[in-house]
Image: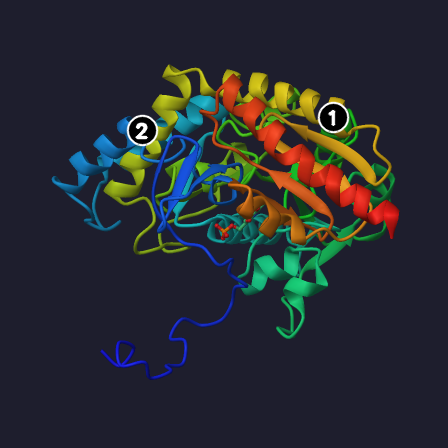
C-alpha cells in the first residue's frame, strides 16, 4: 500500500546479496523466463541445484503427490521416505548410513561433529580437522572457519578452534602435518573446489590421501555438496577413483530445488552418533525426501549421469576449441557438467553481459567463469551455450588486449 503511494521503504530483506536486476516467473527444462517474458539459457542451475532443470514433470508430480499426503511429521517418528532415500544413497555410494539436514553447511556441520566425536574416542583432547586453502564449506561459524577464504571469514572472529590448513592438492604438506600435529583426527576437502574456482586435484591424489588417512587414523571426509548427485559424471566425484571416503556430505542437486542436505558415513564413522548427539527439526522430512527420491530415480532411469559426462565433454571440448588458444584465457577445466574458464583478470562484468544475451552464468573467485548447467541439457543446448558464451569471452579478451 505504502509502496503503491510511492513512499520510499527501507529494504525489508537483509542485504546479504548483490542481486542481479532480474527475477524469474517460471522455467522449463534448461530455460528460465523473466517477468518480461525474456528467455534465458540457464547455465548455472541455481548454483548447481536444479539438476533436473526447471519444472521437471517427474519431480513436480512427486512433490505435488507428497504435499497432498504428508509434508512433515518430525524426527520423533519414523519417516518412510527418509529411510527409502537413505537406502538409495547408501546403495549408490557404498556408505553405511545417512543423517539428513537442510543444506550443505549443515551437512558439513554434521561431518565436523562426527570428526570431533571420533577424535575424542581416540583420546585426542583437542581434535583438529585439516582443511584446504581455497575451500568453501558454508556460512555457519564452523563451516566458514573451515572455508579457506578471508572474505567469508572477515568480521566473524573469533573463529572456531580445531582447524589447520593445507594447500589444495599438496600431499607433501599433508604428510608434514601428520608428522607434526598429533591432534589431527580428520581431513575435509572438496574433490573439485567449486567456489574456489573449479580446482581439480592432481591425478592419484585421493589414493595418496586415503593411504595417509589410514596410516594416521584420520577420517577422510569429502564435501560433495556441489560435486555430488551426478554433477561430475559419476554419482559422487570420488567414484572417478577407487577410493572410499569415511564421510561424504552432499546437498544442492539432491533435492532438485527443495532444500535437503545429507551426511553419509561408513565404518567406524557410521557408529559415532547416538540418540541425542545431533538433530534437526526439518531435516529429512517427507516432502524433502520425496523430492530426493524423485531426483535419484530420474538421474538413474533417464541416464542423466552419463549425460552429464557426455555433455560435459562436449562443452569442455567446444570451449577449448573456440577459446583455448586466446591470450587472456588461462585455463579451461572441469569434469562432467562442472566447468570453469579461468581468465587473466577479474571478469565479473561477464555475468551482466550474459544476462543481456539471454544466458545465465556465474563468476567465482573473481576471474573464473563457472558453468553448472542442468544435467538434462541436450547436445543442441550445449552447442547453443557455447555459441552464446564464446563471443562474450572473445570480446572480453579483445578489450583487455587492446587496453
Ligand atoms: C562445496 C560446498 N560446500 C558447502 C556449501 C554450502 O552449502 P549451503 O549453501 O547449502 O549451506 C557449498 C555452497 O556453495 C559448496 O559449494
> Where 398 falls versus 382 (above or below)?
below
Is residue 83 toward the left or the right of residue 45 in the image?
A: left
Circle on res. 198? none
Q: How is the image coloured?
A: rainbow
Ligand 1 neighbours mark 2 (CB distance < 8 Å) = no
- Comparing 208 with 333, the one in front is 333
Residue holding disc 1: 322
Q: Which is more toward the observer, 94 or 338?
A: 338
Q: Can you give x and y, in whole percent of width and height, for residue 20 in the image?
A: 51, 57
Q: Note whether 378 is above or below 43 in the view shown.
A: above
User: Residue 260, how many percent across, how many down?
Assistant: 38, 44
Residue that sits furthest to the bottom in the current view = 7
Q: Residue at x 58, y 44 (%)?
A: 354
Residue occupying the point 43% across, 22% down: 91
Q: Give whichever of 30, 176 is nearer the camera.
A: 30
The residue lying furthest to the left in this view is 69
Q: Residues within 10 Å of mark 1 (few under 14, many from 20)?
A: some
**For this rendering, which residue is in front, 176 or 225?**
225
Q: Residue at x 84, y 41 (%)?
A: 328
- In front: mark 2 or mark 1? 1
Q: Secondary structure at mark 2?
A: helix
- Specify whether residue 146 is in view: yes
Looking at the picture, how far across and down is residue 48, in whole percent?
Answer: 51, 40
Q: CA distance from mark 2 to mark 1?
A: 37 Å
The answer to which image quadrant residue 128 occupies is bottom right
Q: Locate the N terminus and report the quarter of the image it occupies.
A: bottom left
Judging from the image, what secondary structure is the residue with disc 1 in? helix
- The tag earlier along the polypeptide, 2 or 1, is 2
Neighbor class of circle 2 (other Cα within 10 Å; few <14, some 14-19, many 20+) is many
Task: Give the percent coordinates (x, y) of residue 72.
Answer: 20, 48
Q: In this figure, which residue is indicated by the disc labeled 2?
A: 294
Whether residue 177 is visible: no
Amino acid at each position: 500500500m505504502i509502496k503503491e503511494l510511492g513512499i520510499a521503504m527501507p529494504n525489508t530483506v537483509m542485504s546479504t546479496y548483490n542481486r542481479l536486476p532480474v527475477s524469474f516467473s517460471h522455467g522449463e527444462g534448461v530455460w528460465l523466463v523473466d517477468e518480461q517474458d525474456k528467455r534465458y539459457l540457464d547455465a548455472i542451475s541455481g548454483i548447481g541445484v536444479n539438476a533436473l532443470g526447471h519444472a521437471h514433470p517427474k519431480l513436480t508430480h512427486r512433490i505435488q503427490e507428497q504435499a497432498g499426503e504428508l509434508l512433515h511429521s518430525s524426527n520423533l517418528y519414523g519417516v518412510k521416505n527418509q529411510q527409502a532415500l537413505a537406502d538409495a544413497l547408501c546403495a549408490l555410494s557404498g556408505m553405511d548410513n545417512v543423517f539428513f539436514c537442510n543444506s550443505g553447511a549443515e551437512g558439513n556441520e554434521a561431518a565436523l561433529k562426527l570428526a570431533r566425536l571420533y577424535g575424542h574416542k581416540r583420546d585426542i583432547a583437542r581434535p583438529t580437522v585439516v582443511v584446504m586453502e581455497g575451500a568453501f564449506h558454508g556460512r555457519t561459524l564452523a563451516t566458514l572457519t573451515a572455508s579457506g577464504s578471508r572474505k567469508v571469514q572477515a568480521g566473524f572472529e573469533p573463529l572456531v578452534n580445531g582447524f589447520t590448513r593445507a594447500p589444495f592438492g599438496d600431499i607433501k604438506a599433508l604428510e608434514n602435518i601428520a608428522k607434526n600435529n598429533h591432534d589431527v583426527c580428520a581431513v575435509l576437502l572438496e574433490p573439485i573446489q567449486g567456489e574456489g574456482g573449479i580446482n581439480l586435484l592432481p591425478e592419484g591424489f585421493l589414493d595418496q590421501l586415503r593411504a595417509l588417512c589410514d596410516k594416521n587414523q584420520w577420517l577422510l571426509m569429502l564435501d560433495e555438496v556441489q560435486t555430488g548427485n551426478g554433477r561430475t559424471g559419476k554419482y559422487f566425484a570420488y567414484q572417478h577413483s577407487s577410493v572410499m571416503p569415511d564421510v561424504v556430505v552432499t546437498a544442492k542437486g539432491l533435492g532438485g530445488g527443495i532444500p535437503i542436505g545429507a551426511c553419509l558415513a561408513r565404518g567406524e564413522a557410521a557408529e559415532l552418533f547416538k540418540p541425542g548427539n545431533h538433530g534437526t527439526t526439518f531435516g529429512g522430512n517427507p516432502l524433502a525426501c520425496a523430492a530426493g527420491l524423485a531426483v535419484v530415480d530420474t538421474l538413474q532411469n533417464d541416464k542423466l549421469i552419463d549425460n552429464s559426462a557426455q555433455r560435459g565433454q562436449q562443452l569442455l571440448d567446444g570451449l577449448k576449441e573456440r577459446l583455448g588458444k586466446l591470450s587472456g584465457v588461462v585455463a579451461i577445466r572441469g569434469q562432467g557438467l562442472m566447468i570453469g574458464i579461468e581468465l587473466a583478470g577479474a571478469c565479473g562484468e561477464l555475468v551482466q553481459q550474459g544476462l543481456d544475451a539471454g544466458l545465465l552464468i556465474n563468476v567465482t573467485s573473481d576471474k573464473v567463469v563457472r558453468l553448472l548447467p542442468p544435467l538434462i541439457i541436450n547436445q543442441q543446448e550445449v552447442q547453443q551455450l557455447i555459441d552464446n558464451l564464446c563471443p562474450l569471452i572473445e570480446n572480453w579478451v579483445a578489450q583487455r588486449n587492446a587496453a
